[in-house]
């Protein structure tokens, strides 16, 4: 019988598998995807948010624990477990050495609206390179990897893991780490949760999935049905406004539209509906998918003018371009008069200030609802550009409740041999909201803990010294 079974093939699963193997456990990793699609949402990532008290290789200045924690508190609106959040934060200050040991390389951030060079360490080659490095290292260390192996059910008795099933194949293990992502790729489940809106529409039918098609939440649902303790709720998710032309799955990072804070966003009636300049983009981008999801037809339109070109990461699809706002309205299918009126009202409300997108500047509006709090420049210099937006689901937050040991809990009792990491438990730290780079922070830290604890559970006293190093 294998010591540790790891279910999933993304960042959290790989961290768990590597640490468990380093601790001396035999490890089998089951990845639902075929080899060419391995790695889950992790292949789309670019960075990890990392605490540091002084400049560290690619990280500038300092990002101390307290500031990181305040950022978490702000974006989650308090829906976070302080103990677990601080546990993750502290561990990000020293996990990069271990990541480098397994082949991950870092690079300084590029410039653009995501001004993250102080807070986030970027992976050279992105998440795909990170995942490839971890798979390579896992193979070298003797982790057995099986692709095309979606686990469809678990056998659990009195909170203890006994076996997992792939089709009719029963696989036993002494301990198990669940790292199979959220349920964001399960469109039926999303539809069930979002239901019908005030316009008689079913919003989830218009959602795009930014990452893998393999995170369908089968095991999450089974565990919840079995009475495992849960966190967050099924409506909470990281949702980004993406280009409406993005594919249904795996559009990844390049379909994100990053010019929201440089312009305005209107709905299909050409009306603004939220403050486009409320906070820095890394703390706001994950709200816009949800904001668009609540608009009629789940559609939005980001409008900018020529002044701001070159200041944001260009999306993969070019926007509609027009010399006049009338022409732009026609190209986007918006009512001309309504768009002109909205832009005129917004322009008139912009107070003159010193524009600086690297700080929370003093360019704001006065006398309109919703306000634009920062970076409010009149939209008056053609050509004008428009991007049609749809909600893009990154990952869902409903997950399994856990503690610093990463154990799955049943009626508040920690399982002795079933552990969880990554998106499947991210809701413990992220009840709602998001700050860029936190997903990989949670997955890396809890993946490592889950791997160490699973090895300990499987091997007892035999566990090797450097287990959780
Ligand atoms: C476009 C995009 C960009 C992102 N950028 C960043 C970023 O820069 N920084 C950041 O911190 N976060 C980012 N995130 C979020 C980040 O991807 C996640 O927080 C993180 O990857 C979660 O890791 P995970 O291992 O839990 O899940 P995943 O990486 O999604 O892995 C889940 C794995 O489980 C497998 N699986 C699912 N069901 C089963 C089953 N039944 N049996 C077996 N295997 C199964 C899947 O195939 C997959 O391999 C981004 C997400 C997306 C979509």
Image (spheres, helix red, strand yellow):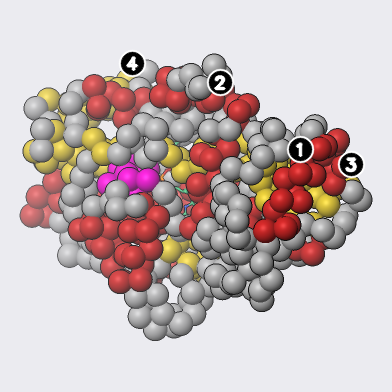
- The Cα atoms of the two marked residues, 4 and 1, are separated by 59 Å
Q: Residue furthest front?
A: 367
Query: Which numbered circle lies on residue 168?
Result: 4
Quick one: label 4 or label 3, which is nearer the N terminus? 4
Q: Is residue 284 left or right of residue 326?
A: left
How far from the left and from the top, in percent, is residue 283?
Answer: 48, 58
How far from the left and from the top, in percent, is residue 300?
Answer: 66, 38
Quick one: label 1 or label 2, which is nearer the N terminus? 2
- The Cα atoms of the two marked residues, 1 and 3, are separated by 13 Å
Quadrant of the image for the N terminus? top left
Element type at marker 3? Answer: helix
Mark 3, residue position: 327
Mark 2, residue position: 199
- The Cα atoms of the two marked residues, 4 and 3, are separated by 59 Å
Q: Residue furthest right?
A: 323
What residue is shown at x 34% (from left), y 49% (from top)? 430
Magenta-colored span? 423-432
Quick one: label 4 or label 2, which is nearer the N terminus? 4
Frontmost of labels 1 and 2 is 1
Q: Residues within 10 Å of mark 3 (few under 14, many from 20)?
A: some
């Amino acid at each position: 019988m294998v010591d540790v079974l790891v279910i999933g093939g993304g960042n959290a699963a790989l961290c768990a598998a590597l640490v468990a193997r380093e601790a001396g456990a035999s490890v089998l990793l089951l990845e639902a995807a075929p080899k060419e699609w391995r790695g889950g949402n992790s292949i789309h990532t670019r960075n990890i948010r990392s605490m540091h008290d002084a400049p560290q290789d690619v990280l500038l200045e300092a990002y101390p624990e307290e500031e990181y924690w305040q950022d978490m508190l702000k974006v989650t609106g308090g829906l976070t477990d302080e103990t677990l959040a601080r546990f993750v934060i502290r561990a990000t200050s020293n996990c990069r050495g271990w990541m480098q040991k397994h082949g991950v390389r870092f690079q300084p951030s590029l410039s653009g609206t995501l001004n993250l060079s102080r807070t986030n360490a970027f992976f050279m080659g992105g998440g795909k390179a990170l995942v490839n490095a971890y798979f390579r290292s896992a193979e070298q260390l003797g982790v057995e990897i099986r692709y095309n192996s979606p686990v469809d059910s678990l056998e659990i008795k009195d909170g203890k893991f006994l076996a997992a099933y792939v089709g009719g194949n029963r696989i036993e293990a002494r301990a198990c780490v669940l790292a199979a992502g959220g349920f964001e790729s399960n469109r039926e489940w999303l539809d069930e949760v979002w239901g019908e809106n005030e316009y008689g529409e079913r919003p989830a039918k218009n959602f795009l999935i930014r990452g893998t098609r393999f995170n369908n939440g089968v095991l999450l649902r089974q565990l919840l049905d079995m009475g495992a303790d849960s966190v967050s709720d099924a409506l909470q998710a990281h949702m980004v406004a993406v280009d409406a032309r993005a594919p249904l799955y795996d559009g990844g990072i390049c379909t994100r539209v990053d010019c929201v804070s440089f312009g305005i966003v209107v709905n299909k009636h050409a009306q603004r509906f939220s403050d486009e300049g409320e906070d820095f983009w890394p703390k706001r981008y994950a709200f816009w998918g949800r904001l668009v999801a609540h608009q009629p037809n789940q559609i939005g339109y980001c409008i900018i003018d020529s002044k701001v070109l070159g200041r944001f990461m260009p999306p993969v699809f070019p926007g509609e371009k027009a010399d006049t706002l009338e022409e732009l309205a026609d190209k986007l299918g918006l009512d001309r008069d309504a768009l002109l009126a909205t832009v005129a009202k917004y322009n008139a409300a912009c107070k003159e200030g010193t524009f600086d997108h690297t700080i929370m500047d003093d360019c704001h509006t006065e006398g309109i609802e919703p306000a634009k709090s920062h970076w409010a420049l009149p939209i008056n210099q053609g050509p004008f550009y428009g991007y049609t937006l749809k909600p893009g689901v990154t990952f869902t937050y409903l997950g399994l409740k856990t503690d610093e040991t990463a154990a799955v809990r049943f009626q508040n009792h920690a399982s002795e041999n079933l552990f969880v990491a990554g998106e499947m438990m991210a809701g413990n730290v992220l009840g709602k909201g998001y700050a860029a780079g936190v997903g990989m922070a949670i997955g890396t830290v809890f993946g490592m803990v889950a791997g160490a604890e699973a090895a300990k559970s499987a091997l007892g006293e035999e566990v090797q010294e450097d287990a959780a190093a």
